[in-house]
Amino acid sequence: MSKTGVSENLRFNGALLQCFFSECERHFRFLEQRYGYMFFCGLLEYRNNYKMIKPLNQQEFNGPFMAVTRYEKGEQAFEITYSSSQFLIESHAFYNPIDRFELSEIMTAARKSDPALRGDWGINDASLIEKTIREMAKSFEKHSQILLEPGDKLLNRAMTIRHKQLEQSIREKHKSSIDATCQHAAKAYREKNYRLVIQLLEPVKRYLKRGEIKKLERAKKLLFT
């Protein structure tokens, strides 16, 4: 990238970040004024496994960035983040020093739905930042009783839902992997590459359907007879 290109990129990212910080400070100010949360903002960095928030001082950042606006009170904290990866804006809650929840996870556990709390991606324009933060803050304020004091029962339900979704995701990925292996093996079988068929299907034999097992057994017979 030319010096001109780098300079333009710096100005572009800088303008987006300034907009993000100012909109968060403006629309989430009720957390400070009404509930007594402390406000921090800056660029997120990790040093020796510790998370640090570095103030934005017009430094150069033409590479990846993670911006965060954080509200703290005791062991609780809420974060609104903006990353250069897909220009994604997200919101999270910390109700203890260990566990992190998406705000949308808490709402799902409360059997309520509010798409604005899920954030969005592709937010690479000031007007989109303003709209996303404004709607997110409005939804947070609307559901503040749930989000600020969810209670152990609700948090346990949110964790259970997360685990079930993770298990479902793992099962779907595993099924997708097996299906791809079977397709590869079917192609090898048509090409009479029986050794490859065996190499592909034998390690996953326990997950195969009856037809694929028969194909594996026929490949063994054809290869060794």
Image (cartoon, grey):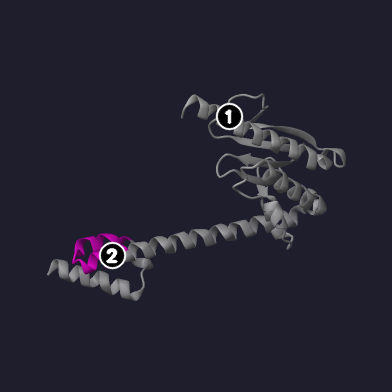
| Residue that protrudes farthest toward the front in the picture | 4
In the image, taking residue 91 as reference, residue 46 lies left or right, namely: left
Q: Residue at x 56, y 45 (%)?
A: 86
In the image, taking residue 221 as reference, residue 174 lies left or right, namely: right
Of the two numbered discs 2 and 1 on the same chain, state the one appearing first in sequence. 1
Q: Residue at x 56, y 30 (%)?
A: 8
Q: Residue at x 61, y 30 (%)?
A: 11
Within-10-Å neighbours for mark 2: few <14, some 14–19, many 20+:
many
The label number, if any, that marks residue 10 in the structure image: 1
In the image, taking residue 78 as reference, residue 204 lies left or right, namely: left
Asked whether residue 75 is in view, the answer is no
| Residue that protrudes farthest toward the right in the picture | 34
Which amino acid is tagged 1? Leu
Tell me where residue 63 appears, x and y as whole percent: 53, 32
Find the magenta span and give its range: 184-203
Tell me where residue 178 appears, x and y as whole percent: 38, 63
- Foreground mark, 2 or 1? 1
Within-10-Å neighbours for mark 1: few <14, some 14–19, many 20+:
some
Circles 2 and 1, Cβ within 8 Å, touching? The answer is no
Closer to the camera in the image, 187 or 203? 187
Which amino acid is tagged 2? Ala
In the picture, the quarter occupied by the C terminus is bottom left
The residue singled out by tag 2 in the image is 185
